[in-house]
Image (cartoon, rainbow, N blue to C red):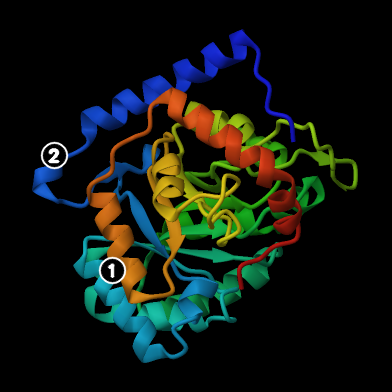
């Protein structure tokens, strides 16, 4: 993928990244305090840790409930105050494991889950079960899970669709906030942001500039395409002051490794946290990774705009197209 920017584009991107970086520096606690940094989740007003525990396939890698619950408790002990789960993660298994922690420590963390069906009645029935599995009477945030294309958005927006069901659940105080997630289609997510009554959005934001615009019946596979969530959907979310959550920070390990075309986890996390996001949702399949990510987050220093452009340019050239194709039909189950 080419990565050529005009001088005007470079200056515009630098100004945007510079403003975000300045704000992050101003709000960051001193390194000496070793406190877990927190940020405001957009218009929700909720304050969350800058790193969130992703409870998808990486949580399942612990192999059993006892080990998974121990990892979640460790994360909370280390100041990670956002747990991200979904019904689709093991058909409720992840929610059940999170529920064992929620039963005892519910007041210590922000709880998000996701719902995959686009039919409102089906979604509501599953979410009734989610409340039981999560052992709570209120979920902080429920996302429409993995928005795909324009047809998918139309199904979600239908009179009997999942979005109207979630709006009703918000009125009933079953959830405090409503959101949408997307792995590959920033153009459709931008449309959803602009015309939906949502509070939060979760999108793939990484140094590989993940995200492809949609064609009439799917992705446009164009090696020179510059589209990404960072360029297309992120500005729309900021304009509406939505709570912005990043995911796929490491491309499910696709961006990790030695050599000039890959990176280490620390720099990938640093890049994403240097964007104007509230938190980065990261899978942590080992206790040592939980400790490591918490330590990195406590000592976070934002990249400069120039560092971000250079870093993303190198990583995107080598990895963007493969990553976009990988996540085109992805659901982290």
- Identity of the residue drawn at 29% across and 38% down: 301
Is residue 158 among the parts visible in the rendering?
no
- Identity of the residue drawn at 59% across and 36% down: 314
When asked about the image quadrant of residue 215, the answer is top right
Please give left or right for residue 33 compared with residue 127 in the image.
left
Please give left or right for residue 15 compared with residue 184 in the image.
left
Label 1 to label 2: alpha-carbon separation = 21 Å
Residue 136 locus on image (x, y percent): 35, 75
Please give left or right for residue 221 compared with residue 123 in the image.
right
Q: Which mark is residue 203?
A: none
When asked about the image quadrant of residue 318, the answer is top right
- Identity of the residue drawn at 50% across and 73% down: 58
Camera-nearest residue between 255 and 242: 255
Name the residue carrying label 2: 30
Mark 2 lies on a secondary structure that is: loop
Residue 24 locus on image (x, y percent): 30, 32
Residue 34 locus on image (x, y percent): 14, 51
Mark 1 lies on a secondary structure that is: helix
Camera-nearest residue between 78 and 239: 78
Nearer the camera: disc 1 or disc 2: 2
Please give left or right for residue 114 compared with residue 328 in the image.
left
Residue 135 locus on image (x, y percent): 36, 80
| Classed neighbour count for the residue bearing mark 2: other residues with Cα under 10 Å, few (<14), some (14–19), many (≥20) | few
Name the residue carrying label 1: 75
Query: Mark 1 or 2 closer to N-term?
Result: 2
């Amino acid at each position: 993928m080419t990565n050529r920017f005009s001088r005007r584009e470079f200056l515009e991107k630098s100004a945007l990244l510079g403003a975000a970086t300045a704000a992050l520096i101003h709000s960051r606690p001193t390194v000496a305090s070793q406190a877990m940094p927190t940020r405001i989740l957009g218009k929700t007003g909720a304050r969350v840790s800058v790193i969130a525990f992703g409870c998808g396939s990486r949580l399942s890698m612990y192999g059993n409930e006892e080990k998974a619950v121990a990892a979640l408790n460790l994360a909370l002990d280390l100041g990670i105050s956002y747990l991200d789960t979904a019904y689709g993660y093991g058909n409720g298994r992840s929610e059940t494991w999170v529920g064992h922690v929620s039963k005892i420590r519910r007041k210590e963390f922000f709880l998000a889950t996701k719902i995959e069906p686009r039919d409102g009645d089906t979604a509501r029935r599953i979410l009734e079960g989610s409340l039981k599995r999560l052992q709570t009477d209120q979920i902080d945030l429920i996302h429409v899970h993995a928005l795909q294309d324009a047809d998918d958005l139309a199904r979600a927006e239908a009179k009997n669709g999942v979005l109207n069901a979630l709006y009703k659940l918000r009125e009933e105080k079953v959830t405090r906030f409503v959101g949408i997630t997307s792995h590959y289609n920033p153009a459709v997510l931008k449309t959803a942001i602009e015309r939906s009554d949502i509070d939060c959005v979760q999108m793939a934001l990484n140094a590989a500039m993940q995200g492809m615009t949609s064609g009439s019946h799917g992705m446009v596979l164009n090696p020179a395409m510059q589209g990404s969530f960072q360029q297309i959907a992120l500005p729309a979310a900021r304009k509406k002051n939505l709570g912005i959550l990043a995911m796929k920070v490491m491309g499910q390990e696709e961006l990790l490794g030695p050599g000039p075309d890959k990176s280490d986890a620390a720099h990938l996390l640093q890049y994403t946290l240097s964007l104007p996001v509230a938190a980065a949702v990261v899978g942590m399949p080992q206790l040592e990774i939980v400790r490591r990510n918490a330590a990195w987050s406590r000592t976070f220093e934002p990249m400069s705009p120039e560092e971000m452009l250079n870093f993303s340019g190198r990583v995107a050239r080598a990895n963007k197209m493969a990553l976009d194709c990988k996540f085109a039909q992805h659901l982290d189950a």
